[in-house]
Image (cartoon, grey):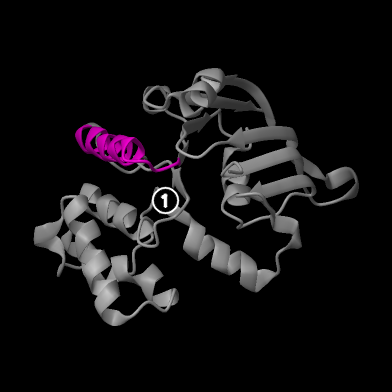
Amino acid sequence: MPAILELHGVEKIYGSGPAALRVLSDVNLTVEQGEYVAVVGPSGSGKSTLLNIFGCLDVPSSGRYLVEGKDTATLDDTQLSHLRNRRIGFVFQSFHLVSHLTVLENVELPLFYARRPRAERRRRALELIEAVGLSGRAGHRPAQLSGGERQRTAIARALANEPALLLADEPTGNLDSVTSREIMALIGRLHRDGATVVLITHDPEIARLAPRRVALRDGRVESDSGRTAAVEAGA
């Protein structure tokens, strides 16, 4: 079985000539199925750019990025959109919920775009809403929810199409400490249930919850702790 994601010699440069900005330099990274990886680093280290490449929202300037063995450079826009919707789940710091839709309708969205039958969409969404502890909030809109409830909704939506990879970008950045612990406990439970998780964070306490931690600095991988243990555990 191929790795969930592989980066080989990935570089990302914005602009050209003297004004060119190199954000990522020779990044080599592999994440296997079932791993839980925290990517950490100071502001400007390249974390956000790396996340965008992971999620097929941006492309490397050079190098190769493979998702489940497929080289993303060989995919057209339609194929990339399909990959993002079916195989990658996103959880963002600012939730990105649709304000005029209910919790149930927000969770159903990826299933709608995947053209799943209405009855199947409803059943799957209700299962996920219960799994994240929001059974009593299915009919509420985002403005009626707490920050933690909004993030739980976002996590349920990210899991709708049973993605191979869950990408979480600073998922506790807008939450208080108590709610942050609850959300991280939920992400930890999802990983124990088999989800592959890549978490972007600047918070060392959050990062320590992941068995594997990849540190970026100046666009390069400075360290990768837990890699050997992660591979052996999956063997």
Q: Tell me, yes or no, whether the highlighted magenta stretch contains residue 188.
A: yes
Residue drawn at (42%, 79%), measured in percent from left and top? Answer: 115
Q: Residue furthest right?
A: 17
Residue drawn at (56%, 26%), measured in percent from left and top? Answer: 214
**Residue 159: where, in percent of width, then height?**
36, 56
Q: Is residue 149 left or right of residue 28?
A: left
**Residue 188: where, in percent of width, then height?**
31, 35
Residue drawn at (69%, 56%), measured in percent from left and top? Answer: 72
Q: Is residue 146 visible?
A: no
- Name the image quarter holding residue 100: bottom left
> Is the stretch drawn in magenta largely helix, strand or loop?
helix
Residue 123 vertical position relative to residue 32 in the rendered view, above or below: below
Q: Is residue 59 left or right of residue 51?
A: right
Q: Is residue 128 visible?
A: yes
In terms of depth relative to the viewer, which is nearer, 13 or 66? 66
Residue 205 vertical position relative to residue 31 in the rendered view, above or below: above
**Residue 197: where, in percent of width, then height?**
44, 40
Residue 199 vertical position relative to residue 229 in the rendered view, above or below: below
**Residue 32: where, in percent of width, then height?**
54, 36
Q: Which residues are magenta?
A: 178-196
Q: Residue furthest left?
A: 136
Residue bearing mark 1: 92
Dividing the image into 4 quarters, which one contains the N terminus?
top right
Q: Tell me, yes or no, whether the highlighted magenta stretch contains residue 75.
A: no
Going by the numbered disc 1, the residue's amino acid type is Phe
Residue drawn at (86%, 50%), measured in percent from left and top? Answer: 16
Question: Dot 1 lies on which element?
Answer: strand
In terms of depth relative to the viewer, which is nearer, 85 or 43? 85
Q: Is residue 64 left or right of residue 162?
A: right
